[in-house]
Amino acid sequence: MATSNAAAHRARVRPRRPGGRIAARLYAWGTLTPVLVFVALFTLFPFFYALVTSLHRYVLTIPGKPYVGLGNYRTALSDAMVHSSARTSLIFIAAAVPLVTVLGLGVAVLLNQRVKGFGILLVLVLLPWSVPTVSAGIMWRLLLHGDFGAIDGFLYRFHAIDSYVQWLSGSKLALMSVILVHAWREFPLPVILFLAGLQTIPPELTEAARLDRASAWQRFRWVTLPLLKAPLLIVLVYETIVAISVFDVVYVLTGGGPGSATTLYSWYTYTVTFKFLDLGMGAAMSFLMAAVLFVFILLYMRIVRLREAEA
Amino acid sequence: MQNTWVGRQPARALLVLWLVAGVAAVAAVGATARTTSASTVDLKFQVWSYSIPTIQSNIKRFQTLYPGVKVNLSDTSWFDYHDVMATKFTGGSAPDIAYSSDHWLREWVAANWIAPLDKYFPQFKQYQKEWAPYAREGMTLDGHLYGLPYYADLIDFLYNADQVKQAGFNGAPKTWDDVRKISLALKQKNIVQYPLNIPLKKDDPWLIEIFYAMVYGNGGHMFDKNDNPVFNKPGSAAEKMLQWLQNARTKWKILDPAGPESAEPDVVKTMGGGHSTFTVLAKYNLAELNLGQHKEAGHFKLALMPGTTHSTVGFVRFYAMTANASKRGSDVTKSVGKFLQYFGGKTGGKYAVEKRWALEKGLGFANLPLYNDPQIKKAINKWGSVPLEQSQAKLAHVKEGLTPFWGVWDISAREQLDKAILGQESPRAALKNMADRWNQLKKQYKR
């Protein structure tokens, strides 16, 4: 029955006139071409242009663009500042990813308790996500400023500190502040993903565990968490990708300083490209970062596919 | 019915769509052609974001005087100005006229981004004799003139005279050791916790000029006449000054620890609020401090740069005609000439725009005869001191080492200065890194 239905459907959609098939193809290509042109223009062209640039000595203020092969890659890999910024990036990733994940999971679990005013709470949680990063960065810069920051003012007023804390001027504190602001900005997405995951868990499972006298932590650890494996993996991989390429928060908050305390690899790539105007080296550094990102993107896609297969 | 839609209508619809797109494209090209052929000359003018309403008002006045010229203003942050301009010049979206600075003159000329003005407007050379030496030097390269002044100013030592008096001292500090002594007294008497405040924010381009000024004030140099670094020599004035700044922050705790996150406006705010007593900034900030809405307004004074010679940095920011404008034909070039004449030169025998900046914003000027203008004298004496300003101007020098790669070096230099002041590095190591970067760039640009 199904076969005959499919055959009937094919017969219905098959063009009656010989010119119909050509017209359909024309239609298909006609509608696809603008999209393909756009993709080629905005994705493939920049990619190959950047690749070619990375193989040339291309400094905006020096005339000529001689071919240097892998010279820019060699320079990048042996540059002390690249090493230092990569180390800072690793610290950033190691702190920011777990923080965003735990924060996102914690808030999602709380929101899943079906508390009163759930809608308002959800809006409040999503607020950081809706504020443009630059505005958020400026807001945080003013809040954290060591001379007139509102946070210091508040803490000082309530005698929590003796003198103003230099959130953005101390080497370690500055990196910590950047991580915290990044986490504040990033955690709403994990909240949504975890909340969606939590709402698919049948309540009977936790109820059964409760009847077995499992504590709240035990119910979370042995029932909820295993069922959140897929969103957890997605969040971990996605947030790692974001943390590797994060740039805007540093741009607005610290400019990579004080000294080089918050100079992440992505920020240093920007500095080399747009401040040192060394496009060749900047492109090479971008490709090195892209190689690392590529691994995580593959991992991310694999997890998403596995999840789809499971579903 | 479905067959007909798939087979026939889409082809027609597609044809109509392409036709509409084609007609729209032709119409757009036609419209552009009409704009170009119109009698009005459009000029693109790029500035950094400072007092945009005043600039717009100046443009309006200019356009009233020259109705055939339309000026389109764009602005970008001072912090990113160099980088944005480099991408505009190389990306094919260069303006016709742009703010520039002595910082970048050699770089922009070497890259062929700006045009020599004397080649197109020989009459502008007559202005040079009225300019302060540091301003003239900052706009001239290899005998060619590349700009007319927007403003020229000094890096000055500013202090809160009221607080210094409260600390038991009379008059301004003469040396950096005096600054230390007064600062410690201010701390001890609980008048101010961190008396010295300097914008150390890594992406604020003022830092390097401030450091130069401090080195000059102590009789030191940054580079020799052949543009070789001398700041890295053991025991140099630069090393002593950097060590002093490190001590000020880490040992004596007189330098505001929030300095590395403070740009020029933050420091003005902190000084105005009475939280700091001493600073080193461009002179025009004194006008803001004394006339602006600040708790301590009226208490601030100018002093000669502390040190042995009291020398300082004199700098100039100027209007430049881009190479792009010079290629757009004689109509555009002539209009740029009118613009430059109005904004950086004389109109009806008067420096209209430069005078306006001085009166309304306290900006310094390159044209020394303006000091004889009674209106200017009166305005400056409201918030500063004409005789002191003139004394400091006589001791001012242009920045040394202005090479095509100075702008790029400056970015690394600021980072190293920050590291040394914060105590992350020794002053000697930081200065060595600065010199290494200089030599690396010198080699790179020689290739």
Image (cartoon, rainbow, N blue to C red):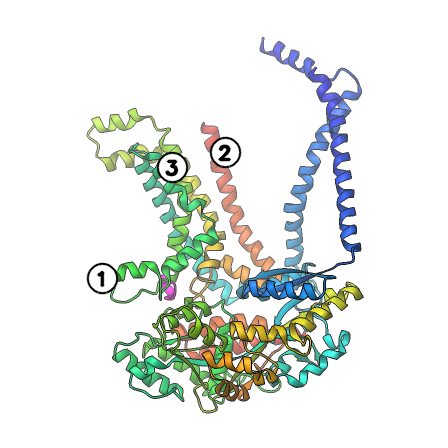
* Residue at position x 52%, y 49% in the image: A293
Q: Secondary structure at mark 1?
A: loop
Q: Nearer the viewer, mark 1 or mark 3?
A: 1
Give residue A210's quadrant in the image. Answer: top left
Please give the residue where the numbered disc 1 appears in the rendered image.
Answer: A159
Percent from the top left, x then y, of residue A141?
41, 59
Please give the residue where the numbered disc 2 appears in the rendered image.
Answer: A305
The label shown at residue A194 is 3
Residue that extends furthest to the left in the rendered view of this protein: A213
Give the extent of the magenta segment.
A168-173
> How much space separates mark 1 and mark 3, taking CA atoms?
38 Å
Total marks placed: 3
Q: Is residue B348 above or below residue A256?
A: below
Percent from the top left, x then y, of residue A226?
34, 34
Q: Report the amino acid beneath label 2.
A: Arg
**On the rendered image, what quadrant is the C terminus of chain B found in?**
bottom right
